[in-house]
Image (tube, rainbow, N blue to C red):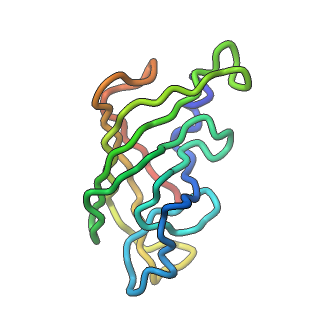
Amino acid sequence: MLCAAAALATAVSPASAATSAASSGPARVAVVDCFSEPQVRPGDFLIACGDGNNHLIGLQWSDWGDTSAKGSGFDSVNDCQPYCAAGRFHSYPVVVSLDRPQSWEKRPELKHFTRMQLTYTGDRPAHTEQHETYELWD
């Protein structure tokens, strides 16, 4: 679990169901994935880019606007028991909120969300609060 917790503030992933911001027409606010690709309404979102032990899956977005986005899905977390390579993934239902859009350093004409908030609606990973906030990278 420590492996996943240490990597939580690290990243995001490409999503097959996501729309690339580059192909979405007029400038929209995106979320930047682990490969520095802007995504709009991603279906999956890797939180732990370094080791892949924590990712959001099955995301369904109810709102995606210029100032915030809201959706729900599952936080899939490796329990790292007895160690991460031998651990099992467990999924926890979450509500995901993105906000604080800013110009993206790599492409200043595009804005990206810089904060993610997770609210666990049922069980949650050990040593995790019901409401977790993560600063996203540029």
Relative side of 102 to 77, left or right:
left
In percent of width and height, residue 126 lies at 45, 18
User: Is 131 on the left or on the right of 87, as rendered?
Assistant: left
Percent across and percent down for residue 74 are 42, 38
Decide which of 135, 15 is in the foreground and name it: 15
In the image, 10 versus 121, the foreground residue is: 121
**Which quadrant would residue 75 be assigned to in this image?**
top left
Displayed quadrant of residue 24:
bottom left
Farthest residue in the bottom direction? 26
Identify the residue at image location x=48%, y=80%.
108
**Extreme top residue here?**
82
Q: Residue at x 53, y 45 (%)?
A: 47
Q: Residue at x 58, y 68 (%)?
A: 37
Q: Position of residue 18 (x, y in %)?
A: 48, 64
8, above or below 130, in the image: below
Q: Where residue 137 appears, x then y in whole percent?
A: 52, 56
